[in-house]
Image: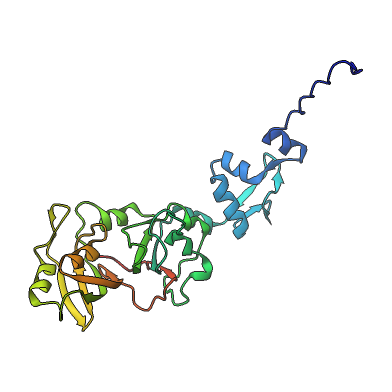
Amino acid sequence: MVSNPGMPDRPRAPPPQPTDDAAAAEGGGVRISKLMSERGLASRREADEWIAAGYVRVAGVPAVLGQRVAPDAAIEIDARARRLQGERVTVLLHKPVGYVSGQAEDGHAPAAALVQPGNRWREDRSRIEFHRGHLRGLAPAGRLDIDSTGLLVLTQDGRIAKLLIGDDHRVEKEYLVRVRHLGPGALPPAGLERLRHGLVLDGVTLRPARVSWANEDQLRFVLREGRKRQIRRMCELVGLEVLALKRVRIGSVVLGALPSGQWRYLGPNERFV
């Protein structure tokens, strides 16, 4: 084609891009993760995770990420991948200050970001093998505000989430709370009694709580409910400033010696109630 010197050349349309299937054909096959998805063996993401973990073989040879195979290739899946696919895990995390319980907000990272192999507690006795699939759908069952520390439960199991945060939940949660009395002298006995029963938040009378002194500047709270910033607001109503708040137990599961910023799996024989 000869350009007309009086007219600008028309821009040429870019050549059509090959589809995934066409690209696969040109490369001598189909991406193995796509083929596994088409056969209903796994999602593409699961397939890539299994391949990376060494759980997938093609004709007896370990597969590699991005590998292309024939459409009728014989694909073998390790039994461990199947077990992981059906396994719903629960993680116990010692949340530090500065992390939010749920989605990232205001530049603060979610606590779930700490659930990585390098942060797993070396004393974890669960014998559960870590798998990247354990991070999918891992959601907090309850919350700790950004300034609080201690035991945070993250789970893939809807039954555990309902048990801990459902409308009818009755699982005890225990906290150690370091406080400072804003009035003269120490907190009077009447203030302690009000913490135990009689306070109202958001127009609702709080359920009875067990509150006692753990030492001269630290209170122990045991609650069966979890309103937003409940303990801090309760303390404010009786003239106490909260200096530090740490959750140390949920039901029968204790924080124990789990270090700050580290996590472990809920063991197969552990129960919250």
Question: Position of 256 compared to 75: left or right?
Answer: left
Question: Position of 113 compared to 234: left or right?
Answer: right
Name the image quarter holding the C terminus: bottom left
* Residue 163 occupies quadrant: bottom left
Q: Residue at x 15, y 71 (%)?
A: 210
The one of 233 and 86 positioned closer to us in this rendering: 233
- Which residue ends up furthest to the bottom in the rendered image? 216
Q: Colour scheme used in the picture?
A: rainbow
Q: Please, is residue 13 above or below residue 151 in the view? A: above
The one of 215 and 238 positioned closer to us in this rendering: 238
Instruction: Give coordinates of residue 235: x percent, y percent.
Output: 20, 68
Instruction: Give coordinates of residue 211: x percent, y percent.
Output: 16, 73
Instruction: Give coordinates of residue 126: x percent, y percent.
Output: 42, 70
Q: Residue at x 46, y 74 (%)?
A: 121
Residue 30 in view (yes/no)? yes
The one of 40 and 138 positioned closer to us in this rendering: 138
The one of 225 and 2 positioned closer to us in this rendering: 2
Q: Residue at x 56, y 48 (%)?
A: 45
Q: Residue at x 20, y 69 (%)?
A: 222
Q: Please, is residue 164 above or below residue 184 in the view? A: above
* Residue 213 occupies quadrant: bottom left
Q: Please, is residue 220 above or below residue 56 in the view? A: below
